[in-house]
Amino acid sequence: MFKRLVLGAALSAVATLTLASTGSALAAPVSAGAPAPGKVADKLFRAWLAADRAGAAKVATPAAVKAIFTYVYRAPDRFDGCSGNVCRFVHTSVRVPGGLDGIAMVVTGSKVSKVYLSRHITEPPIVAKHLFAAWKRGDEYGGLEVATSATVQKLFKVKYDPRGVTHFFQGCSRERQGYSCAYSYEGGAMLMHVRGSRNAGYEVRSISYLAD
């Protein structure tokens, strides 16, 4: 795997950054007396950089600790602030698949309760299924793990309706510059256009729709 990049001044300023309040589906009010989300996220990030699982366990749930220690890329090199209770650490010097561009942490009270990661996925169908599952859950950050920001924004404009049409995965086929992975439904189909390579990892670069 890649060597992790030890952060410098960017992380030393974590505690002084003003937290954004633009809101998201995951945003939640911070309990009175709880540490600021950015401080909690920074503690987990530093524990991960130090390969300190015991330290990480003090500020994150077991699932969050397990997730962050699976990250395959070198460490993101910039703290990008928090939107509500979701804090992000992003890459500025390496290109990774998806629009998440690094690591996002959901902070609940005094602990990180969930971690989202840029994914290195080597099979187009897995990428398409990951995005579709995130859409079904209404989980935009999950979508950003494997798809560009513009793709996620377009897909999530329409909320998945479990009582609506049934989607059937039809697999992926070669197209110019990549793959087209299709979900058919009564009256049409949704095409996920996947780009990348096995070495670099795949992402859903765009989506389109067909009508019967």
Image (cartoon, rainbow, N blue to C red):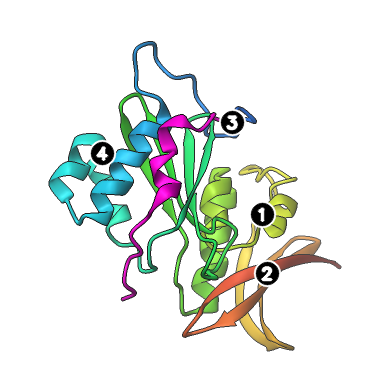
| Label 2 environment density (alpha carbons within 10 Å; few <14, some 14–19, many ≥20) | many
| Label 3 environment density (alpha carbons within 10 Å; few <14, some 14–19, many ≥20) | some
Q: Report the magenta residues as a range.
A: 1-20
The label shown at residue 152 is: 1
Q: Which of 14 and 155 is in front in this view?
A: 14
Can you say which quadrant of the picture contains the C terminus? Answer: bottom right
Q: Position of residue 110 (x, y in %)?
A: 30, 26
Can you say which quadrant of the picture contains the N terminus? Answer: bottom left
Q: How far apart are marks 4 and 3 (CA)?
A: 24 Å
Q: Position of residue 24 (x, y in %)?
A: 60, 34
Q: Is residue 128 above or below residue 155?
A: below
Q: Which of marks 3 and 1 is nearer the N terminus?
A: 3
Q: Please say if the residues under marks 2 and 1 sit with CB atoms less than 8 Å apart.
A: no
Task: Judge whether residue 17 is colored magenta.
Answer: yes
The label shown at residue 61 is: 4
Q: Nearer the viewer, residue 10 or 118?
A: 10
The label shown at residue 20 is: 3
